[in-house]
Amino acid sequence: MILSHQKKFIFVHIYKVAGSSIRSVLSKYDDRDSSDLSIFNNSRIWMEQKFFRTETSFLTHLKAREIQKMIKEVDFNNYFKFSFVRNPWDWQVSLYYFMMQSTNHRQHKLVSKMKNFEEYLDWRINKDLDFQKHFVCDSKGKLLVDFVGRFENIQADFDHICDRIYIPRFRLPVKNTSNHLHYKEYYTSKTRKWVEEAFKEDIELFGYEF
């Protein structure tokens, strides 16, 4: 996340949705201090996650509901909260190739031993399923953020955010990309259906189609 008291905004960073590019531009406004995360070390949120995520990863990819519990209620309610989402079929291709190509990724060894993208999807859906919805909604499915931008429309949506938080518009740089073809090239009718069924909640909430 990025938390700016000066500009009164919170950025919820969903992994592999151009968050690194956005962070590189907005980090100058990130002015968290120790009081913002004073309950961090002893929080139930961290205790539940620390065996699975590094501290850096934990802070970078905090979900909106986690942030809500860790900062002042008045700040969370009054600050402009935003995030970006990505087509679930495209998201999975990006995740797969990022983990394959990033040797320092915690799941690189596991994923690099898989035969192909289909085997990765089978593992992801049955063993390590995660939803973009969970980053921006509460436990009842209610949106906790004020604006959800789209990866597919990232520059225009980011321009809107810049206007909303009263900062100059910036051209987003390209960061942490993986090398692969258009996502549709990697799917069969079977694997396309797998994602359609597994990520139904994201597809319906954010209005995506293959």
Image (cartoon, grey):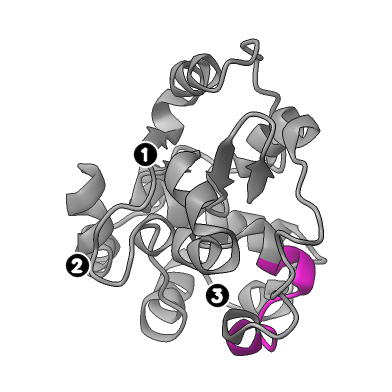
Secondary element under disc 1, as helix, strand or loop, is loop
Real-space Cα separation, disc 2 to disc 3, in angstroms: 23 Å
Q: Is the C-beta separation of discs 1 and 3 under 8 Å?
A: no
The residue to which callout 1 is attached is: 146
Total label count?
Answer: 3
Dot 2 surroundings within 10 Å: few (below 14), some, or many (20 or more)?
few
Task: Determine the residue positioned at 69% across, 62% down.
Answer: 59
- Which three-letter amino acid code belongs to the residue tagged 3? Lys
- Which three-letter amino acid code belongs to the residue tagged 1? Asp
Q: Is the C-beta separation of discs 1 and 2 under 8 Å?
A: no
Magenta highlight range: 47-58
Q: Nearer the viewer, mark 2 or mark 3?
A: 2
The residue to which callout 3 is attached is: 115
Q: Image height check: is 125 above or below 181?
A: below
Q: Image height check: is 88 above or below 78?
A: below
Residue 63 in the image, given as x and y percentages of width and height: 50, 62
Real-space Cα separation, disc 1 to disc 2, in angstroms: 27 Å
Query: From the viewer's perspective, is 66 left or right of 144?
Result: right
Residue 168 in the image, given as x and y percentages of width and height: 65, 10
50 inside magenta stretch:
yes
First reached walking from the N terminus: tag 1 or tag 2: 1
